[in-house]
Amino acid sequence: MTFRNAIAASLLAGACAIGMTGVVPVQAAARRVPASVPAKVDLTRPNVVVVLVDDLDWADVSTYGRTDVPTPNIDRIAKTGVAFSSGYVAASVCAVSRAGLMTGRMPQRFGFTYNINDKGDVGAGLPVGQKTIADRLQPLGYRTAAFGKWHLGADRQFYPTNRGFDEFFGFLAGETNYVDPKTPGIVTTPTKVDKYEIGPGEGNHAMVEGPDARPADDFSKYLTNQITDRAVDFINRSADAKQPFFSYVAYNAPHWPLQVPQAYYDRFANVKDPVRRTYIAMIAAMDDGVGQILDTLEERGLRENTIVVFLSDNGCPERFGFCNTNHPWGSGKFTYLEGGTRVPFMMSWPAALKPHATVDAPVSSLDIAATVMKAVNPRKPLPAELEGRDLLTTVRKPDADRLLVWGQEPVYAARQGSKKLWVSRDWQQSHLYDLESDPAESQDLTAKDTANAKRLSGEIDRFRTSLPDPLWELHLTRKVKINGRETEMVY
């Protein structure tokens, strides 16, 4: 059995076999009947909810037919819309990936090449000349809000309410703590490489809100729940105001540190490793939050005309010991193996996209901005600077041969069709893989397939030589092992 067919056999319940160019029909999930649905839906004014989670790998959702981690609410998005099994992000690290999603452009094109270090990189952030999705929607009468992790710059010019968002509740750094570990009913699990003792957030790790970044810490309440509550409240207020809205819900789960309410930890007594168990429990808590958001949309009669997108910012970081080692894409953060950039990626818009399919053709987080702008301005061409494609068009006409190129000097990768080339310029190495027959990227085909190796190398060179200098410096590169495979990480 080829890997293509192996994926197909394990995808959503009721799915049929797929190919690289194909789609898989799925049965629509049962949904609550909304309290009221407008008799006529204005499809040019859809609401938008983008749920971005942190360090969740492709293999740790049940959407793709896997049983390791049940995610019934994330699955609801796919079953009422589409799941992309070859969904990618712009980079394999948090800040760079988020810059791509938020702008619809490869961040390296405007110098956002490397991650923002919480302890350094003074002045680093999303350049003010780069429009966010919120910047584009605000003038069209949309209410806009961001909740959770920002990580696109801590200086005032980078602050969310200066980047198109009316509201913000969250933290500016790349990570923060979820709750006081002394809180009754909380499980805090150490890992083999914990960074520091868990305590109240300080500096950019602290919770803030509003345009004046006033303190908003409630260290006695689990942060995943706080983010959910804020998102639900914003949806309700927007519904009351009868205004279209854009809600960017950026959960920090399941990013380190490992903290979760005992009730979720108890769900997974079958998982013997406490580190892995806590990580799975954190995913479950986040999944329940997604369910609350979907329920609120349904109860307010908004679900039909709301675009909901769910994805992760990158793959799972191997070093903590909680990643899924049973799948080749179960880890890879900081690297350009598939587990670094291929992520869970689902979308629904019931008014415009019937429960349709699992699509295996490659898509990108850059497509989100293009999809939203096409939806709100269907008669206008997309802004020329956007690099993504309309996802609804992709669902109708999947492009299995789409070229995708990634890179943070000195490491690059390119995929077209089933072929992928990985390049390290400082190691002076390149490896060609066939993802259909070799999903683990373990067999270098360069000598056997020189034509594809040369062609993809040329595409990487075109991308690399078109880029400006990075706006801040590379922090480090290092040889790492991902599920037993040696590769190079970039930070």
Image (cartoon, rainbow, N blue to C red):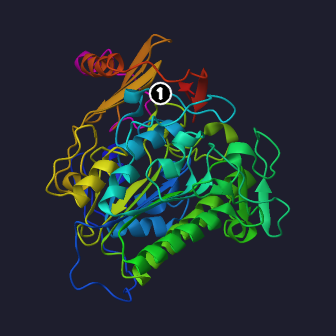
8 vs 160, nearest the viewer: 160
Count of number-bearing discs: 1
Q: Position of residue 3 (x, y in %)?
A: 35, 44
Q: Amino acid at mark 1?
A: Thr
Q: Main secondary structure of the magenta part?
A: loop
Per the image, is 441 magenta?
yes
Indicate left or right for 190 with 63 as reference: right
Q: Position of residue 104 (x, y in %)?
A: 34, 43
Q: In the image, which residues are magenta?
A: 436-453
- In the displayed structure, would residue 426 be above or below residue 141? above
Q: Secondary structure at mark 1?
A: loop
Residue 218 position by quadrant: bottom right
Q: Is residue 303 left or right of residue 354?
A: right
Q: Which image quarter: residue 453?
A: top left
Residue 35, x across and y down, in percent: 38, 89
Judge the density around disc 1: few (<14), some (14-19), many (≥20) Cα neighbours within 10 Å: many
